[in-house]
Amino acid sequence: MAATRIWIKNPLALFTATTSTAAGGLVIEDGVIVQLLAAGEAPATPCGQVFDAREHVVLPGLINTHHHFYQTLTRAWAPVVNQPLFPWLKTLYPVWARLTPEKLAVASTVALTELLLSGCTTAADHHYLFPDGLEEAIDVQVEAVRALGMRAMLTRGSMSLGEKDGGLPPQQTVQQGQVILDDSLRLIRRYHERGDGAHVQIALAPCSPFSVTTEIMSASAALAEAEDVRLHTHLAETLDEEDFCLRRFGLRTVDYLDSVGWLGPRTWLAHGIHFNPDEIARLGAAGTGICHCPSSNMRLASGICPTLELEAAGAPIGLGVDGSASNDASNMVLEARQALYLQRLRYGAERITTERALGWATRGSARLLGRHDIGELALGRQADLALFKLDELRFSGSHDPLSALLLCGADRADRVMVDGQWRVIDGQVEGLDLQALIARHREAARALIAG
């Protein structure tokens, strides 16, 4: 049970829309922020727990809006280290097809643990591999999320267009359309939570234009509307993908998205790099969100997301670490730093501020997931917090605490709270044997590669 009332007292700094009014800290009651205190102000009602945050920078819990948890098993694998997206995928698909429930469980736990230690409290995962024996992959992920006490948007991904029909993935990794739709409905009915405070939610996520049929895209859109859940896919990540859409459908990526009923506010897209001005205007008018994945886009040399044009057009922008085979880490505070620097190359330092990058990792990401109860330190929001200390050598001599988090390279939170409960204390996940987890994960990774 969460403590009845908690006072996060006198923080070194907070990331809120009105930081000057909350220098005295936050009061949390039953997992919700109920008071923002001015400097020198104390709670009107006594609190059962007081945490002195004078050495801590307090952020809303960071929100990761695109990941592939299973890929923690194939980090820095030599055959793909220097490949761009399409050959990278073609080389890895046969390896990933050997996933088992046990390997997925340990991979998901590792990804979530990394995220949690980096200050992330909510994670979206895009799982689209369901080889024989792994039909209940999302059920496995639900258990991992619950064990760590985090929030998650678990997307029921799919691949239905194999090599023999002109797609990219091998046949052993694809499923029939009705199987996909039946399982999608099962997962929604069993796990999807609605309303403020939801811990587990389900979205529908056909993988990409080059791995699913138009039929499954259209049917997924119809099911998502009927069940009022969100839609997610990869789009406009590379020029190879754009060429594929033109050859197969005679359409550019946004035209294709529109043709299958996906152009709307229910949808958020991973990557969103290769759009022309007209497409950006259409995405913004539709309220379709974009998850910027800077580390992955740099690793695979895919390009740079046009974030400011998309935002100006009306498209929400959030951040995602993407899979740990194209990022090789699951660290949201480092992803915010990467977004800051990559976007400055495109738009300049004056326009891409540390506050904007942190906003993408919090408020912006919450919008992508359709959440209004997380991503901000504000009255009525869920008590999901990430607290960072600036006591390491890398921060010595820094002056602005919020900027120091990104500019000096913070990579680990000291404390993390989800739903009013401490999940990380003194940089350690409560109740987790980290060394045992690492040992299990390393063995699973070796076994997967060995086949």
Image (tube, rainbow, N blue to C red):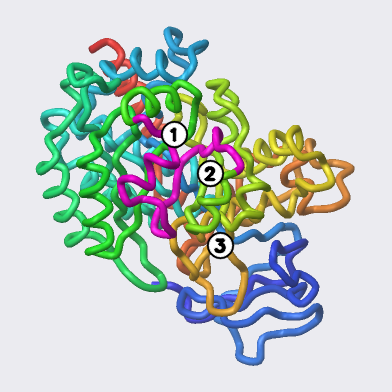
Q: Which residue is mark 1?
A: 252
- SS for dot 2: helix
Separation of marks 1 and 3 at Cα, in angstroms: 33 Å
- SS for dot 1: loop
Where does residue 54 sit, x and y in percent of width and height?
A: 75, 63
Q: Which residue is mark 2?
A: 279
Q: Residue furthest top?
A: 79
Where does residue 240 sit, x and y in percent of width and height?
A: 45, 21
Circle 2: residue type: Glu
The residue sitting at 69% across, 72% down in the picture is: 9
Image: magenta residue range: 250-277
The residue sitting at 32% across, 36% down in the picture is: 207
Q: Judge whether 409 appears above or below 328 on screen.
A: below
Dots 3, 2 in contact, CB < 8 A: no
Circle 3: residue type: Gly
Which class describes the residues within 10 Å of circle 1: few (<14), some (14-19), or many (20+)? many
Residue placed most toward the observer, 208 or 16: 208
Separation of marks 3 and 2 at Cα, in angstroms: 28 Å
Which class describes the residues within 10 Å of circle 3: few (<14), some (14-19), or many (20+)? many
Which class describes the residues within 10 Å of circle 2: few (<14), some (14-19), or many (20+)? some
| Among the two numbered marks 2 and 1 on one chain, the one whose residue lies closer to the N terminus | 1
The N terminus - image quarter:
bottom left
Q: Which residue is mark 3?
A: 375
